[in-house]
Image: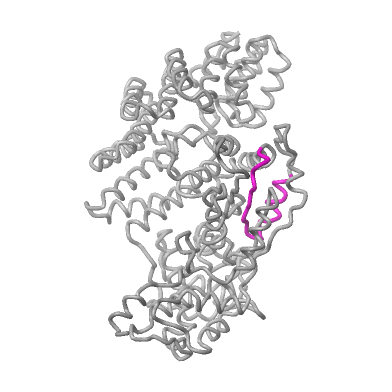
Amino acid sequence: MTVSVMAHYVDRQPYVGARPFRPQESGQFFGRSEAVAELADRWRRHRLSVLTGPPGSGKTSLLHARLVPDAALRATAVLPVGRPFGPPPPALAALPEHNPYTLALLCSWAPATPPNHLAGLSLYEFLRRDASPGRPSPLFVAIDQVEKVFERHARLDPHRAGFLAQLREAIAELPDLHLLLSVRERHLADLEGALRAAGPATGPRSDPGAALGALEPYVLGPLTTADAVEAVERPVQGSGRWYADGAAEEIVSAVATGRDAVDPVLLQAVCSRLWAALPSDVTAITVQDVHAHPGVERALREFCGQAIADVAAEHDLSTLRLASWLQRTFTAQPGQGNDAAESAAREGLPAAVLASLQDRYVLAAGPTYQLHHELLTGPLLSVDIADLRPGGTGPGWRLSAAESALFRGDLAAAEHNAGAVLGDAGEEDLTLLARARSRMGDIAHLRGDPQRAASAYRAAAALYETLQDNGAVARLLAATGRSLLEQGLDVEAVETLRSAVDRLPADLALQTELGRTLWQVGHGRAGVTVLTEVLSADAHAPEALRTRGEMLADLGQPEGALRDLDRVRPHLRPEGRAARALSLLGTGDAHGAEEEAEAALAAGPGNGPALLYTARLRALGGHPAAAADLAQRSLAATAPALTRRGRAEAVQLVEDPSASA
């Protein structure tokens, strides 16, 4: 074979590097046959299985590259690997109240479904609707990186308990569901406690305890030496290269983390850099090549340098400053970072920086932060300027960083990276520019600045108009309309929502938002008419039922309200429960109303609409002082805040509680 012909084959990179494997890379995934067989058997036999292990052990790769694709090849009913985190859907202002963890998971299961069709659904509602009559049974579902649910972020913390309650409900209510949860060892106890917590076993068909009784997590540890050699040698087959005797074993021994234990991340980091550095005329990879191209120590040094540069770029930090801090903190006493969090705070480094370094396998979190492995001590200490080269800082990379920061609520980092896209992307990158402009609208929306949000959404819509993406334009118009509503521009808001519906007349989610908006500007009966048309097209649409039920309660039609709200009762948000309490009082069930009102306030102590409905209930029940107090609390509530019309009603109740009686 000539060099030119051979080079055509060796250009293919057989190693994925330090990131997880993707489904299309299953042909490169080796070394885990025993784990795959054992997990597949557990998943098949048990309704609930748990996969755990330390960071970087390969849990995500195993799910994506082997376990789920193998199940799909067997014609089993299996959803794509789910994740309870990820880029938030665009045009956030257009979405109804929702749980971010739930919506992220549903979007990963149904990537082709518009997010506004998924927002507001519970896990049970989605999985039940997915259970079509012709679908094979059971349904196999895997959720990866569940540890993200237990990480602390101000924007996400209020939604954790609700997401876990939905998880328990799905286990309890769907007997044909076979669920596999993957979680890092550090949060295994958190997951087990959450699954066994007293939760909403709302259905008669199944006891969650029965599914949890035999819970024995499968621990995915390091690769064995033999499996690591297979992971090195097998991916290069058919490439025009091969490993000479002893070469693969030399790599494995260099990144061994113990007796018969090899770290998969470090192994991939070294192999990918070796492959990229080999001269094109090399066919047999020898021990000498392993040490020369570029060498294990240098490969790990480059791995550390790239991770540092990526994190610094993501968080708008000085790369040299971050590298210097890491070297001071983690190499003076190898493997130790006992005061890393405090040291980072003194250095002015956000906590999110430590999390990003953990996600890139430089650090590992436990009771304290430490290096991912002591093997990185020398390479980290020797990192110099030449090694501090980011893996990617182009507009696409920046946009991904912005979306990751947006999900966890780090709006400063999100704005920095989205702004960089707007500054760096060329006019030929219209899609990136449109997405970045839309994200600027989302950032303004989350900051409570509807004027800037509307401006950014309009600019994004204009770019998508050029791209002839009618669906994106419609959803951005809906987000613009909701932002206009927050500014008190009622007429313009309704007109903009109508324009969105006109573009996608069959989109029931957009019609639901139009109905909600009509109600919130004082045209409740018109809103009910719109929602009735939605329900005539889909009688089981949960968000439409919740919204129309709340409208009817507000309009003083308790019987109709209860018909709608009772159909979705297990999945009512706090404001829905409070609206149901108001309706129960309207039908003469004072005891039931009181119980439901207390439950609504317990579930949403900072929920403005729930507090206002309960204030109205107290006023109608002859308790003006309690009504005024609740109305006052509703004015200060932020999760969610009252609409402008709701605020006017609350002020009236504060001033004259008897007016609602």
Above/below status of 156 relative to 285: above
Q: Position of residue 452 (x, y in %)?
A: 34, 37
Q: Please state, as top left, top right, bottom left or bottom right, where the C terminus lies in the image.
A: top right
**Relative horizontal placement of residue 212, taking residue 495 as reference (left or right):** right
Q: Please state, as top left, top right, bottom left or bottom right, where the N terminus lies in the image.
A: bottom left
Seen as rendered, the residue at the extreme bottom is 288
Instruction: Reply yes or no: does residue 178 show up in magenta.
Output: yes
* 345 vs 505, nearest the viewer: 505
Residue at the spot 59% in from the left edge and 32% down from the top edge:
606
**Relative horizontal placement of residue 571, taking residue 432 as reference (left or right):** right
Residue at the spot 32% in from the left edge and 53% down from the top edge:
421
* 435 vs 19, nearest the viewer: 19
The quarter holding residue 469 reads top left
* 407 vs 15, nearest the viewer: 15
The quarter holding residue 53 reads bottom right
Q: Would you say residue 651 is visible in this rendering?
A: no
Q: Position of residue 180 (x, y in %)?
A: 63, 52
Q: Would you say residue 485 is visible in this rendering?
A: yes
**Relative horizontal placement of residue 222, taking residue 494 as reference (left or right):** right
The quarter holding residue 375 reads bottom right
**Relative horizontal placement of residue 350, taking residue 168 as reference (left or right):** left
Q: Position of residue 17 (x, y in %)?
A: 46, 70
Q: How is the image coloured?
A: one colour
Above/below status of 450 relative to 443: above
* Magenta residues, start to end: 174-196
Q: Position of residue 202 (x, y in %)?
A: 70, 32
* 231 vs 27, nearest the viewer: 27
Above/below status of 369 relative to 497: below
Above/below status of 361 relative to 376: above
